[in-house]
Image (cartoon, helix red, strand yellow):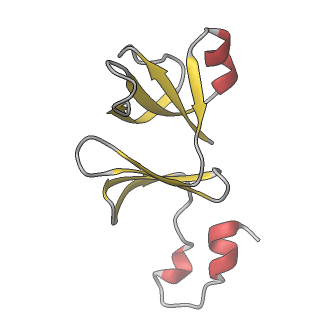
Amino acid sequence: MMFIVRSNGAAPAGVSIKMRRRTPWSLKNETDFFCVGDSESLRAQSLTVVAVHDGWYPDDSGGGVAIFGQGRFWEVRDTPFTIQETDRQPLPSAAAAGEIVDIRAAIFGA
């Protein structure tokens, strides 16, 4: 699950940083780090951890992070339409061979 660590520019340690951006205009001189990892250990270090909700979180260069599935899934995009990295597994190799694939199971594991 992805979350935001909001800091004065120092990157958090012990998590995988997927994207960084300047905070919204009302929070000056801070940086949002979109992270995957253990949020509780960062809270224990007194860092500001913000939960993400379904939606689009733009970065500073035209891309951003798409969050969906009640916050469980994420996609880092360099444009709103081009996926750069995702937490989901690629479709099974049967799709490449032209075979019928159960899309629901491939995407949702159901």
Location of residue 52 with respect to 25 vertically, above or below? below
In the shown orientation, is residue 29 left or right of residue 87? Answer: left
Number of dots carrying numbers: 0
x and y percent of residue 47 in the render? 56, 14
Q: Position of residue 71 (x, y in %)?
A: 63, 50
Q: Is 97 positioned to the left or the right of 29 in the image?
A: right
Identify the residue at the far front of this view. Answer: 26
Quick check: 90 left or right of 76? right
Q: Position of residue 104 (x, y in %)?
A: 67, 78
Examine the image and state in which quarter residue 19 appears: top left
8 or 87: nearer the viewer: 8
Residue positioned 65% across, 51% down in the render: 72
Question: In the rendered view, does 50 fall on the left or right side of 32?
Answer: right
Q: Residue at x 61, y 8 (%)?
A: 45
Image vertical order of residue 1 relative to residue 73, above or below: above
Which image quadrant for residue 22?
top left
Residue lying furthest top in this view? 45
Q: Quadrant of residue 70?
A: bottom right
